[in-house]
Amino acid sequence: MLQNIWKWLIIPLIMIGIGTAIVIYAVNNPTDSIVARMLTYERIFRVIREHMALLLISMLAATFVGVAAGIMLSRPRLYYAGRVVENIVNVGQTIPSLAILALFFTILGLGFRTAVFALFLYSILPILRNTFAGIDGVDYSIIEAARGMGMNSFRILTKIELPIAFPIIVAGIRTAVVINVGAATLATFIAGGGLGDLIVTGLSVHRDMIIVTGATIAALTAILLDYLIGRVEEKIVRWS
Amino acid sequence: MTMKRVLVISLVLVFLAGSIFMTGCAPDEDVVTIGSKEFTEQLILGQIAIHALEDHGIPTEDETGLGGTIVAREALERGDLDMYWEYTGTALVEFFGMDVITDPEESYATVSEADLENDLIWLDYTPFNNTYTIMMRQEDANEWGIESISDLAEAINEGVEAPEPGEWTFATDHEYEARDDGLEELQIHYGFEFADYDVMDLGVVYGALREKDHPVAMGFATDARIADYNLVNLVDDQEFHPVYNCAPVVRQEALDAHPEIPDILNPIAAALDEETMSSLNMQVDIEGQTPSEVAEEWLLEQGFI
Amino acid sequence: MIKLEGISKIFPGQKHHAVKNLNLEINKGDVCVLVGPSGCGKTTTMKMINRLYEPTEGKIFIGGEDALNKDLIKLRLDIGYVIQEIGLFPHMTIEQNIATVPNEKHWPKEKTKEKVEEVMNLVGLDPKIFKDRYPAALSGGQRQRVGVARAMVADPPIMLMDEPFGAVDPITRARLQNEFLRIQEGMEKTIVFVTHDIDEAIKMSETIVVMREGEIVQHATPSDLLSAPADEFVSNLVGRNRSIKRLHLIRIHEILEELGRVKPIPEDTKTDEIKKRLDESATRTVMVVDSDNKLKGVIGVNDLKQKTGEVAADYYQDVMETITNDATLNDALSVMLECGEGYVAVVNENNQYEGTITLGDLLNVVKEDS
């Protein structure tokens, strides 16, 4: 058991270790006054906190809405609408995240909330698509067996379809999280804060150290979250 | 048939090469070649010079929109250009490797003297100073009686209630937040502190001010949106920001051929203040007119031609 | 038990009847097999009984009750359902799969657990080994067993089986069929069974319903069907070798007693005695059993020549394949052909020796018939 926990923790600890080392090094070895001004513990923690807030709020909402919409579209009555929406979603996914951000900036104005909303919309897409595909992909014979044994469609959804689609839905959430971590760095353009503050500032004043610090933390965050979600999924799904 | 085609093509090529050769290496002594960098303000300034000189009977050649600072400067030094408009701050840092200067006169004197040995003459500089600016909405500035950054500092320090959204917050781009001559030093220099600030892309700072997300913002002093959004530059009365006034830089030979050029351009430069420049930029950037149209219209309106 | 009155089904958007004015009565405890080529309406007919398809016209009575006006969920909970694709839930353990209907019926946990173990034993899956496995870890035959166990765990009086043994190899299929018939003997369930395999139909059924283009061509006992096919369609379906098909109808235990076979020998039988017994044997082999009458092995003439020893235990070799006494003569024939021997040993469920069937015995049955 203890060994198991170790196995779980080793990769997160390595990730956090690398991140911490880079932050400590960068803060203590600024190359000039600009780097020193931009890379303080206080500022780095603030942008990480902002980034996590962008990510978590938009992901929670997107998971909720994406799964709900995916379920709704998989119902027989809306099935063909579902196919249409699936195609729209696939096209939507090709719109760059910056364009989505810009679009909602013109409608909703500046700030954290606009950024969260844009990220939310962008993250719905893979979750919705995978939920629909996951439920749609459940073998028909399984559904028929369940119906024949006297399960109503709600029971079939909750006991059969969703559990079987679960790994695919989680795959969608993982995709969304990884995209979201990257897209959230763009929030800084509209005063949404986050790790993008460091990256864009670094780019505009040509200080690689600021860019590297911001980008590394973002990358580590993506890897870490992807890993953790994967591990949780493994714990839950033992059948495949 | 193929022979014929080859012949035609080679003739065309020879002709083209010849014309390039002629214009490139043996310029008409009389013609003044005028250049500019590639952004709106530079294109307009170039066109202003072209229209003004042509109006006084001086033949010109339009080489505006050349590319970056370095391209324009090298073309001028080689003699491919006879003149283009340059900023004092840029020359100071990029050409002479000196530190920025925050006094306009001193900055101008330094660069114009330094360029004498290159046989390049700096004519009079514009009042407009295309540098960082601190902006407010025009109506707020009037109502609060704030004209300069010192006025702003005083209002903040005295705890005067802020215009919408109600707190003395500030909108800045990423670079201004980080720079040594940026936000942090500004506050130290003038002795005040904003309640808070938001960092965003330079492109949305002006909009953030207009939409009343913040009462104060930074920007660039001649940006078209200042005129368009009805914003106002606060005077940098304690000369904190480095200066980037603009002046025509002319080759000595061109002045020898046309000694009346300074008399034509100096009054024009004197009329170009920040408000004017921003408004001219707006006519191109936002209203979609060509730089040449805007330049000619303004010169006519001002009675320069 | 089940009565279909004037049932018709037209699927939306189609002109032709899938099932046309069909009348059928199935007695309690009978296995009624619907057979016919694909598209004949047999599956459609079956699925109307648990209303996976709603009939366009007609009435259905189950145990005297009007099924079409009954609560759908209640109706289905009381009808066991097995399909060819099995449709096991991949995310549930075998135990959870089998417990589906009890859970839908909100049985107490203890009762469900007991009953699940009971049916697992019944279909020959050791609960200790298989209970916590997932379907992916099972072989095709094991999955079919789970499918059957899942359908009968709640003791439904009626079971619908849509080609339930269609997806496994022939040997496994025969074994599953025999096991199922053995179970059915003790249960007396009313079963509607769909297949396109006439051999399976003959073997499994009390009555056979031959269908074509949505209508019943003949409804008869297997024996009648073989001896008096209603028309050319049925006789083509049954095929030319009808007498061999009869082997499906006869269970081994039915003829075993008449045969009065050579008795098996205990393990301590002396060599001389073995020789004597071999001479008496038509197959030139004798079976060796232990004191509990369990089959230990077989001794042929060559074994005596090649090996040296004093008692039977020194000579016998393992039996390649045995057959249970509830199998049909056709199964026995399959095993003989498989092993390349002219005989097969018959044992009961506890591997106790019951007798031996030879190729000659099968020939006699076929001869008598024709």
Image (cartoon, rainbow, N blue to C red):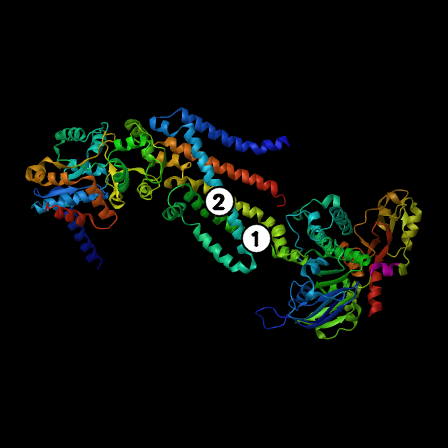
Badge 1 and badge 2 both on one subunit:
yes
Q: Which amino acid, mark 1? A: Ile
Whole-percent x, y for residue C103 in the image: 70, 51
What label sits on residue C311 in the rendered view?
none
Say which chain tag 2 marks: A
User: Which residue is nearer to you in this view: A81 or B23?
Assistant: A81
Q: Can residue C241 be seen in this view?
A: no
Quarter of the picture containing the N terminus of chain A is top right
Label at residue A135: 1
| A185 relative position to C258: left or right | left
Taking the spot 93% from the left edge, 51% from the top edge, the residue there is C276
Question: Do tag 1 and tag 2 residues touch (Cβ < 8 Å)?
Answer: no
Query: Which is nearer the eye, B257 or A120?
Result: A120
From the top left corner, tell me how far across and down residue B157 is, in percent.
31, 29
Alpha carbons under labels 1 and 2: distance apart:
18 Å
Q: Residues within 10 Å of mark 1 (few under 14, many from 20)?
A: many
Query: Quick check: C209 above or below A121?
Result: below
| Residue that appears at 12% across and 32% down | B119
Look at the image and give the residue range highlighted in magenta: C251-256
Decide whether residue C255 is among the magenta residues. Answer: yes
Is B156 inside the magenta-drawn segment? no
Left or right of residue A202, residue C265 in this image: right
Q: Main secondary structure of the magenta part?
A: helix
Residue ID at (21%, 34%): B244
Q: What element carries label 2?
A: helix
The answer to which of marks 1 and 2 sits earlier in the sequence is: 1
Q: Where is residue C333 in the image (x, y as percent from the top left)?
A: 78, 59
Q: Report the residue marked by disc 2.
A: A176
Name the secondary structure under disc 1: helix
| Percent coordinates x, y for residue C207 in the rendering | 77, 67
